[in-house]
């Protein structure tokens, strides 16, 4: 019995110790093949890149670089920064080429985690590459991360619901707010948006000429208290309160479900939503695909499903937050030449065209035509051209990781005083932006 | 040494000797040899990370250091910075409260279930045990996902049932929006996950309580309540204290359940517990030094909270 007790006490101590060490061991680096001298690894984020494109990259790379192989590993978007933080500094485990969210790029470009791609810049497309993405991948005037693909977000709506209520398609941002507020009947949201959903909400800030943060001589300052930003936030607050029945704590909701008819033909939960372009494939009437699975028909019935770009304050288009990602080579890569060869394939006309054909906005403006010329493609190109990115500050990833904007937008959605909140959050965010 | 036998039969002593001598010498060496592998694993598995943690907490260590810049020694600066942050203390108070409520609720419900298992027909007991084992075996992420669906504001079963029962205000109710109801949901999930361990351990202990003692108590006129408080409980107390200690340690380091629930939409900074706070600091903001300092603090806190129990356990041996 004595030994059992001592063992139990020992186990308790061991557990107490693990309680401590469990804090920072998140995300051990994925083991990849380091054995072959000429095997390089590409990390793709999420399932955004279709299998067809992955196969193309592999076979083309292996054809053009005889004896070499390409391993593609898919990383989850949520763990990407964590995994890069642990894997990139380790030359034995680092992936050679990595895809990274555009707004996450500054975290790594500013500390020398990526290889300088400036010598390749012109060869890979130069000034034809999407400027806002190129800019976010720069540090000290050098190119460390280049655009991989862009997405954009626009409004999906139910023309049948809108016309039944006698509401016209808006031409200005103010008209949009009035229209969706009029459409809200308490159970059916005029415009379904969660309170914490700042990635959609900041469109109102951008549209009013506001900025989230500005840089002066390397010092970043959060500018929520800028009068234009405040106007935008207040406008968004009015739209949320008037048009949305989604709780203030919600974010990244599967809004597309709100637009589809309910069970047994019940009315949809929302008349309008805002979503990235690919949401199209989750919207529409139910149909059966070739494999016999029940799927949405991709908005085939244009009398029921339509899209439009969020209008700006005085007509034109509102600058929305652009989705998409950048691509970079690890500074610790053992095979930089092979990695550069892979980039040459990615920025080739064939691959850029394939991106477009799969609905991903090609990085090179010359091949944007490949997206097609239907309503979806033209709206995507238009909104992307007018889109904006979050501040390219070194600490931006930290602001996102701490859910600061989620909290700010929730507080605004709950009816908080925007001016006071803006001042409070400026004070919190400015030191974070500068990485302290 | 068995000196009592010596005067009666001195010549017969030699054949009897080896046995006592082996008994005495055995405990001398064997346990130490046997404990070496366990110690080695502890040192390698926990010692090194702990050492790294302690060293890092005394350095300036951020993303730049992770990418090769030499870290600078800053003494206790990280601790000073962390301890002067009022958010830490809010998280500490929240975590301790949450931990105690969960640990005691888990043990309480576990004991009740164990008593139930003792009382019911064996067939029903098997069903209960299988049910408990299934809950225990459920992968955590899958379980939390299902609970998230149950409590969903729009399509969740819980809201639907409450509305059907006539509580109309639960139509579209968001359980995770307020910190208090967020922690209610988290408590339900965590208690649900940990009760099986407690229930089965305590049930095993209950089967060791001899029927003679219980019968004697009954003959002396003790009712069920008295038997429980004065006979059963003292007899299973060692098991109960170990189980409670483990629950306290586990519930203090709860992380993933809270994180997964926060992903479903919640006021994040008001619902962070210590584990989430460390994760946000270290992984989210790449402030590895600050996160290490908080981790060391959590270690001290865990030792402090569990020390009375460990001391009691050791004292019972003396």
Image (cartoon, rainbow, N blue to C red):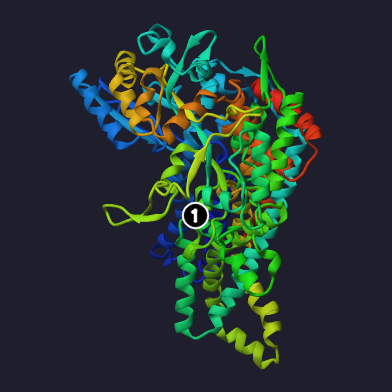
Quadrant showing the C terminus of chain A: top right
Circle 1 marks a residue in which chain? B
The residue that appears at 50% across and 18% down in the rendered structure is A137
* Left or right: where A232 falls relative to B6: right
Give the side of residue A78 with respect to residue A184, left or right.
left
Image quadrant occupied by the N terminus of chain A? bottom right
Front residue of B55/A372: it is A372
Q: Determine whether A415 is above or below B129 in the image.
A: above
- Residue visible at 38% across and 26% down? A93
Tell me where residue A304 appears, x and y as whole percent: 48, 50
Q: Is the residue marked by circle 1 packed among few (<14), some (14-19), or many (20+) residues within 10 Å? A: some
- Residue A433 location (% of width, % of height): 65, 23
Which image quarter: residue A118? top left
Q: Quadrant of residue A31?
A: top left
In depth, the one of A219 and A32 nearer the eye is: A219
Q: Check disc 1 and report the residue beneath it.
A: B140
């Amino acid at each position: 019995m004595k030994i059992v007790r001592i063992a139990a006490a020992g186990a308790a101590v061991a557990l107490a110790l693990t309680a401590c060490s469990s804090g920072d061991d998140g995300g051990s680096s994925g083991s990849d093949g380091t054995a072959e001298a000429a095997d390089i690894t590409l990390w793709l984020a999420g399932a955004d890149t279709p299998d067809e494109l992955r196969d193309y990259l592999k076979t083309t790379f292996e054809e053009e670089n005889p004896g070499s192989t390409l391993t593609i590993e898919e990383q989850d978007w949520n763990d990407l920064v964590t995994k890069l933080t642990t894997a990139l500094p380790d030359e034995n485990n680092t992936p050679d080429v990595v895809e990274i969210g555009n707004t996450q790029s500054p975290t790594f470009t500013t500390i020398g985690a990526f290889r300088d791609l400036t010598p390749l810049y012109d060869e890979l497309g130069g000034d034809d590459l999407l400027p806002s993405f190129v800019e976010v991948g720069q540090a000290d005037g050098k190119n460390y991360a280049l655009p991989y693909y862009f997405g954009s977000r626009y409004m999906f709506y139910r023309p049948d619901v809108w016309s039944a209520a006698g509401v016209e398609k808006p031409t200005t941002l103010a008209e949009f707010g009035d229209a969706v507020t009029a459409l809200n009947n308490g159970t059916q949201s005029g415009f379904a948006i969660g309170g914490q959903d700042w990635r959609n909400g900041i469109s109102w800030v951008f549209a009013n000429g506001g900025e989230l943060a500005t840089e002066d001589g390397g010092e970043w300052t959060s500018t929520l208290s800028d009068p234009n930003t405040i106007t935008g936030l207040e406008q968004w607050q009015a739209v949320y309160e008037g048009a949305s029945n989604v709780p203030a704590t919600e974010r990244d909701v599967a809004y597309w479900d709100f637009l589809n008819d309910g069970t047994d033909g019940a009315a949809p939960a929302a008349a309008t939503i805002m979503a990235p372009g690919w949401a199209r494939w989750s919207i529409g009437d139910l149909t059966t695909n070739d494999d016999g699975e029940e799927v949405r028909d991709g908005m085939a019935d244009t009398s029921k499903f339509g899209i439009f770009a969020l209008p700006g304050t005085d007509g034109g288009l509102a600058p929305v937050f652009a989705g998409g990602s950048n691509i970079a080579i690890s500074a610790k890569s053992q095979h930089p030449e092979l990695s550069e060869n892979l980039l040459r394939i990615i920025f080739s006309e064939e691959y850029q065209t394939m991106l477009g054909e799969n609905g991903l906005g090609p990085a090179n403006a010359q091949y944007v035509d490949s997206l097609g010329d239907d309503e979806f493609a033209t709206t995507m190109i238009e909104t992307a051209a007018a889109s904006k990115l979050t501040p390219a500050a070194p600490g931006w990833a930290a602001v996102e990781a701490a859910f600061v904007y989620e909290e700010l937008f929730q507080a605004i959605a709950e009816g908080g005083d925007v001016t006071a909140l803006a001042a409070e959050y400026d004070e919190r965010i400015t030191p974070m932006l500068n990485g302290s | 040494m068995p000196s009592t036998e010596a005067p009666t039969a001195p010549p017969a002593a030699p054949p009897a000797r080896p046995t006592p001598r082996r008994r005495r010498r055995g405990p001398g060496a064997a346990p130490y040899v046997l404990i070496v592998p366990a110690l080695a694993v502890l040192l390698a598995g926990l010692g090194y990370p702990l050492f790294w943690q302690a060293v890092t907490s005394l350095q300036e260590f951020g993303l730049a250091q992770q990418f090769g810049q030499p870290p600078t020694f800053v003494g206790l600066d990280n601790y000073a910075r962390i301890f002067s942050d009022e958010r830490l203390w809010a998280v500490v108070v929240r975590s301790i409260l949450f931990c105690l409520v969960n640990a005691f609720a888990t043990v309480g419900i576990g004991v009740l279930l164990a008593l139930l298992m003792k009382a019911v027909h064996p067939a029903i007991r098997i069903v209960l045990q299988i049910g408990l084992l299934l809950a225990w075996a459920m992968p955590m992420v899958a379980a939390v996902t299902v609970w998230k669906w149950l409590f969903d504001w729009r399509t969740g079963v819980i809201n639907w049932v409450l509305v059907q029962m006539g509580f109309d205000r639960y139509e579209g109710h968001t359980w995770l929006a307020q910190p208090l109801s967020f922690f209610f949901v988290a408590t339900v999930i965590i208690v649900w996950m940990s009760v099986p361990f407690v229930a089965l351990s305590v049930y095993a202990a209950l089967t060791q309580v001899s029927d003679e003692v219980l019968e004697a108590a009954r003959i002396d006129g003790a009712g069920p309540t008295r038997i429980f408080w004065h006979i059963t409980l003292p007899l299973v107390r060692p098991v109960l204290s170990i189980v409670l200690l483990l629950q306290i340690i586990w519930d203090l380091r709860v992380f993933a359940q809270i994180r997964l629930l926060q992903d479903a939409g919640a006021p994040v900074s008001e619902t962070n517990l210590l584990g989430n706070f460390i994760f946000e600091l270290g992984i989210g903001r790449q402030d590895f030094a600050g996160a290490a300092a908080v981790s060391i603090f959590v270690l001290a806190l865990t030792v402090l909270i569990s020390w009375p129990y460990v001391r009691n356990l050791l004292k019972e041996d003396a």
